[in-house]
Amino acid sequence: MSTAVRAQAGFDQTDAGFLVRGSFRLGLIESVIVLAFALVSRFLGGVPELALEAVLLVAGIAAVTVLPGLWTRARTIEGIAGIGFRLPIWCAK
């Protein structure tokens, strides 16, 4: 029996092509949430507006914080650092 951990192929996906595709998807998701927020703000008022904007805000924050980690499946320090540093930079471009 070995104590070494075997490398698994599906983890730490931090190559540039994968990050560009992930950044594009994340930017698209953010754009849809911003558009939905703007439409709710424009066409609703009062409590329904406030409730839907709160739901959209929480959904947007959850998407931006959780999805990059799920997509890259970071398991090592290098993978976590890669996603924490590279993906926001690609999204900003």
Image (cartoon, rainbow, N blue to C red):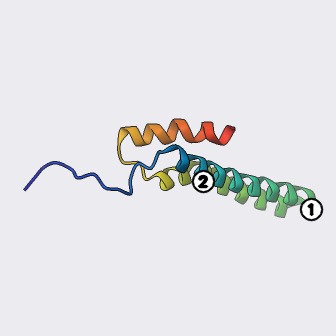
Specify whether 5 is left or right of 69.
Answer: left
- The picture places residue 45, in percent across and down from the top left corner, at 90, 60
Specify whether 35 is left or right of 68.
Answer: right
Q: In the image, what residue occupies the spot 13% across and 49% down?
A: 3
- The picture places residue 41, in percent across and down from the top left corner, at 87, 56
Front-lying residue, 53 or 72: 72
Front-lying residue, 26 or 19: 19
> What kind of element bears circle 2?
helix
What's the residue type where badge 2 is placed?
Answer: Ala
Q: In the image, what residue occupies the spot 23% across and 52% down?
A: 6
Question: First in sequence: mark 2 or mark 1?
Answer: 1
Does residue 23 sit above or below 86 in this rendering?
A: below
Few, some or many residues within 10 Å of mark 1 (<14, 14–19, 20+): few
Task: Give me the disc on residue 32.
Answer: none
The residue singled out by tag 1 in the image is 43
- The picture places residue 23, in percent across and down from the top left corner, at 62, 48
Front-lying residue, 64 or 45: 64
How much space separates mark 2 and mark 1, taking CA atoms? 25 Å
Q: In the image, what residue occupies the spot 92% across and 62% down?
A: 43
> What kind of element bears circle 1?
helix
Give the quarter of the image for residue 67: bottom right
Few, some or many residues within 10 Å of mark 2 (<14, 14–19, 20+): few
The residue singled out by tag 2 in the image is 62
What's the residue type where badge 1 is placed?
Answer: Phe
Q: In the image, what residue occupies the spot 69% across and 38% down?
A: 93
The outermost residue toward the left is 1
The outermost residue toward the front is 17
Callout 2–callout 1 Cβ contact below 8 Å:
no
